[in-house]
């Protein structure tokens, strides 16, 4: 157990290392930093001076080493747009994105789990079929377009909810949160719902598939034969055994919610990391782009690492020996 | 990670049935399979939708009332007209016009073209690359396989949009880069499916027989292994085309697929974004509906294909 954990940790470290190499090569070799970083109006002598001061005239491996050095200290250079350290710019936006992703996940669970349970228990009812068709729509509808339609319906036509920004925020644990104020909640609702749409369908379908598998198991039949009440069978025998795959997918999908918040944040003007990265790509704010990419790599690698550990803890049949 | 994570693989090593072996079923007759395919109403709707979409996309220049990229045909006086209104010169705009006086309907027809081309091109390229690598991994085995599957696992642990963003952040905006981004984001799905299926097929007698006849490796791969692994790959490919179209639309919407001269559906929707708050809904709404019809149709067809091509369902 311990050895396999250590091996997994080494692998994770290696992946992060490989990604630093890819990102570095991508940004510094494929894209030309001189063009991006230096004002084209400068004359040749000034250009050379800037190239030298940025260290772009040194051999690549030296540049890479100093890149790694900066990375280890969390130093990605200063953002061109905000004139602040790139990491600070991103970390500032982190609470907004986390808040949005958490709320979306909550909505997806609260809506998806019961509906999936229902559709799995009574697959032949018309309502179940409507739910399942609806979930296909949830998969097929382009998220960004649904977001626009939300704005059109709830913000423009009905005028019920605001469509832009975070609204009032309250300070808690050193960060600002929207869900603590009524105005902030109103601002949060539409983006969270939009982001949750896809995940709701996913959890719904997963739950339904799980229910249909579990219902056939002997222990459920036995529970029925014992004459247990239906409620107890559903909530203890079925739901409990369903939780492993569902919890796994929730963990896995949380990372992807953060990645997909890029779209939702851009539509609703939500000032999180996702909107920041799109703006940075469009403005060629290289330090912020690199910092964001590296942060995402670390986030996903750690997330997978944690999920792997949870697997072994939850299900002793899984071995971490990396075969497969 | 192993073959049982691929739903379409036959875990029991049953002899290939008519539907399981694509080569065999094609030589016998495809009519029973077609009949089975169309026995579900959803599949008929999907196939019909797909036909219409393809027809419109192919014949856009002849069907559309206006060439939206020909500046001569545009009239700024006709900009932002609601659906159903008539142009300055008396031509009706069924779905209205956008900020530059472009007919939305024509814009959709041409946009559909761009979207489909980008979606198909990237999905096909990803399919070729992914399938080749997946089959090779399964056939060669050993270290190569281990390494390749680690790569696939790694790739699949990142969400597609993040992979695409990474590529675009490095290479910059543009249609070609979007295609590349989608390929990078999606090849791993094919590789995993191909390997999963090939692992099962590899153990079967006909491969052994081919090997005993000392048929060269590449021939066994291409002529014996590949045809029998095709069914699940086709199903995945169908779904992936829909995903590629959606991803392209999303990236274009975010302003990363920029090609102003040939806007895809995603860009058309993005164009309408700025007018949305003033209630000019049609500029974003109708292109979105077109996108929705395309994606749903493909998904319905793919869903049915999976049922029909799955040997376990062939009874």
Image: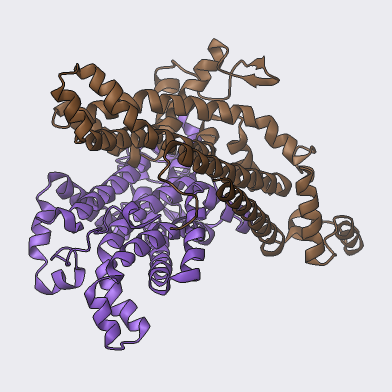
Quarter of the image with the C terminus of chain A is bottom left
Question: Looking at the rendering, which quadrant does residue A300 occupy?
Answer: top right
Question: Looking at the rendering, which quadrant does residue B101 occupy?
Answer: top left
Asked if residue A19 shows in the view, the reply is: yes
Residue A289 percent location from the top left of the image: 67, 47
Q: Is residue A134 left or right of residue B139?
A: left
Q: Is residue A160 above or below residue A90?
A: above
Residue A218 percent location from the top left of the image: 19, 34
Q: Is residue B248 left or right of residue B41?
A: right
Image hue for chain B: purple
Identified at 33% across, 42% down, the residue is A140
Residue A304 percent location from the top left of the image: 53, 44
Residue A82 percent location from the top left of the image: 76, 37
Identified at 22% across, 77% down, the residue is B206
Q: Is residue B25 above or below residue B168?
A: below
Asked if residue B87 shows in the view, the reply is: no
Identified at 56% across, 25% down, the residue is A99
Image hue for chain A: brown
């Amino acid at each position: 157990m311990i050895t396999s954990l250590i091996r997994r940790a080494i692998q994770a470290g290696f992946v992060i290392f490989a990604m630093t190499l890819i990102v570095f090569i991508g940004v510094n070799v494929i894209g030309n930093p001189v063009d991006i970083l230096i004002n084209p109006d400068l004359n040749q002598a000034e250009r050379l001076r800037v190239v030298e001061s940025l260290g772009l005239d040194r051999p690549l491996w030296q540049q890479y080493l100093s890149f790694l050095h900066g990375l280890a200290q969390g130093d990605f250079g200063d953002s061109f747009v905000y004139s602040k350290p790139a990491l600070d710019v991103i970390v500032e936006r982190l609470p907004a994105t986390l808040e949005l992703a958490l709320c979306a996940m909550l909505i997806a669970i609260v809506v998806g789990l019961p509906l999936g349970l229902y559709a799995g228990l009574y697959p032949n009812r018309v309502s179940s079929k409507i739910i399942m068709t609806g979930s296909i729509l949830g998969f097929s509808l382009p998220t960004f377009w649904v977001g626009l339609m939300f704005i059109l319906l709830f913000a423009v036509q009905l005028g019920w909810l605001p469509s832009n920004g975070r609204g009032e925020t309250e300070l808690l644990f050193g960060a600002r949160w929207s869900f603590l104020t009524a105005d902030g909640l109103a601002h949060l609702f539409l983006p969270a719902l939009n982001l949750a749409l896809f995940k709701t369908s996913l959890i719904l379908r997963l739950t339904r598939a799980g229910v249909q598998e579990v219902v056939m198991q002997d222990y459920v039949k036995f529970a029925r034969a014992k004459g247990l009440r239906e409620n107890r069978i559903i909530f203890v025998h079925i739901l409990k055994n369903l939780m492993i795959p569902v919890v796994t997918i929730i963990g896995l999908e949380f990372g992807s919610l953060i990645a997909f918040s890029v779209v939702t944040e851009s539509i609703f003007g939500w000032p999180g990391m996702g909107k920041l990265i799109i703006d940075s790509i469009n403005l060629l704010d290289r330090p912020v782009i690199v910092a964001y990419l590296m942060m995402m790599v670390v986030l996903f690698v750690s997330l997978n690492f944690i999920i792997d550990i949870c697997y072994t803890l939850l299900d002793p049949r899984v071995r971490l020996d990396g075969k497969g | 990670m192993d073959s049982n994570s691929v739903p379409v693989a036959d875990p029991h090593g049953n002899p290939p049935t008519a539907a399981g072996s694509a080569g065999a079923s094609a030589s016998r007759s495809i009519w029973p399979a077609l009949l089975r395919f169309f026995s579900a109403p959803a599949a008929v709707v999907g196939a019909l939708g797909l036909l219409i979409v393809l027809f419109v996309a192919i014949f856009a220049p002849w069907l559309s009332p206006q060439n939206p990229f020909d500046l001569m045909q545009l009239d700024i006086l006709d900009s932002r007209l609601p659906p159903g209104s008539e142009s300055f010169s008396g031509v009706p705009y069924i779905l209205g016009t956008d900020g530059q006086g472009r007919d939305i309907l024509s814009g959709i027809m041409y946009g559909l073209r761009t979207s489909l081309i980008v979606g198909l091109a990237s999905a096909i390229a990803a399919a070729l690359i992914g399938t080749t690598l997946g089959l090779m991994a399964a056939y060669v085995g050993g270290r190569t396989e281990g390494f390749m599957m680690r790569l696939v696992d790694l790739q699949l642990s990142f969400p597609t949009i993040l992979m695409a963003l990474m590529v675009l952040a490095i290479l910059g905006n543009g249609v070609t880069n979007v295609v590349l981004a989608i390929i990078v984001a999606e090849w791993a799905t094919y590789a995993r499916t191909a390997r999963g299926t090939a692992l099962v097929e590899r153990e079967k007698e006909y491969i052994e027989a081919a090997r005993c006849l000392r048929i060269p490796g590449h021939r066994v791969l291409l002529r014996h292994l590949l045809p029998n692994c095709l069914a699940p790959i086709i199903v995945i490919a169908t779904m992936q085309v829909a995903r590629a179209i959606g991803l392209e639309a999303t990236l274009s919407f975010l302003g990363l697929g920029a090609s102003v001269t040939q806007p895809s559906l995603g860009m058309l929707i993005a164009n309408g974004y700025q007018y949305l708050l003033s209630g000019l809904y049609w500029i974003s709404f109708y292109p979105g509906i077109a996108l929705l019809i395309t994606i749903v149709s493909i998904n319905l067809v793919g869903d049915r294909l999976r049922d029909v091509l799955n040997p376990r369902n062939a009874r």
